[in-house]
Image (cartoon, rainbow, N blue to C red):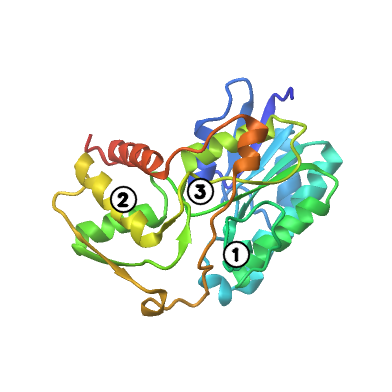
Amino acid sequence: MSASRALVLGAAGQLGRACMDCAPEAIATQGFSRASCDVTDDVALRRVMDEVDPHIVINAAAYTAVDAAEEDRDMAEAVNADAPAMLSAICAQRGARLVHLSTDFVFDGRSPRPYVPDSAPAPLGVYGASKWRGEQAVLAGDARHVVVRTSWVYGPGGRNFVLTMLRLMREQGTVRVVNDQIGSPTSTQGLAKICWLLAERDDARGVYHWSDKGAISWYDFACGIHHEALALGLLSAPASVEPIPTTAFPTTAQRPAYSVLDASATCRALGVVQRPWRDALRDMLRSQQQLEGTA
């Protein structure tokens, strides 16, 4: 696909920043944050589309506060469902290609095996339901599109599990983490590259899954963070990481107990392989180390 201009929405978020950082040199890419473009405002969306006139739009804008969504249903629906519908219609009118990001939370976690793109969604809460409705709007629209589902996303400088664990290990010395929810971490650095590969593949259409390689619990993830952070000097002293069941850490919104995504079709389509999650984590922590000035 020959494209010279691209628009990244949600550019101040961790994935949006990664998409900006690895944008192909041949594509003039502009990013807009929530402050500069309210994706729930049709007029604002059209203004930005007129300004950039993009061939590609990557929609990384989302309402991701899973628990808060249970009480803030209207805003979650506006950002995650209504905005993608508006954006899809605008892209169709302009002939722009749309890459829309979604989540493993569209599934209920009751599958005995990794979810494939054709698996039937059954969201457990408001957040997952709003993302599923956004998917449906994009898939039913006339824009040239791909929907990218991903899971357990983290990146340097963002608000995510990795940096929360790092902070708690530094401040408290002991962290208690659930060990009965299974999924796959996804580094924004790798995910952003997949978004661009799909954006430039005009024959790609429909739903794709992407995560790093490995099915682990949040406890396993925390142990990996602890080990890698110690090795890099991001922790000055060892911390204690203790496993607990989900019942010991109640949340407003129910989480899927198993949300591993099968990315094999994406690998075949793009000729890529998934990175082991520990390798991707190590690279992210090195980037975080540089941000903190401790390298």
Q: Quadrant of the N terminus?
A: top right
Residue at numbered disc 1: 111
Q: Residue at x 72, y 25 (%)?
A: 3
> Label 3 amino acid?
Gly
> Mark 2 vs mark 1: which is more N-terminal?
1
Label 2: which secondary element: helix
Q: Residue at x 56, y 47 (%)?
A: 33
Residue 221 placement (x, y as % from top left)? 36, 55
- In the displayed structure, would residue 18 be above or below residue 107? above
Q: CA distance from mark 2 to mark 1?
A: 25 Å
> Label 2 amino acid?
Gly
Label 1: which secondary element: loop
Q: CA distance from mark 2 to mark 3?
A: 24 Å
Q: Residue at x 35, y 57 (%)?
A: 220
Q: Quadrant of the C terminus?
A: top left
Is residue 93 or residue 274 the one in the foreground?
A: 274
Residue 271 placement (x, y as % from top left)? 61, 29
- Counting other residues with Cα less than 10 Å from the Cα at mark 2, is it few (<14), some (14-19), or many (20 or more)? some
- Counting other residues with Cα less than 10 Å from the Cα at mark 3, is it few (<14), some (14-19), or many (20 or more)? some
Is residue 240 or residue 72 the one in the foreground?
A: 240
Name the side, left or right, on which 198 lies relative to 228. Answer: right
- In the displayed structure, would residue 280 be above or below residue 179? above
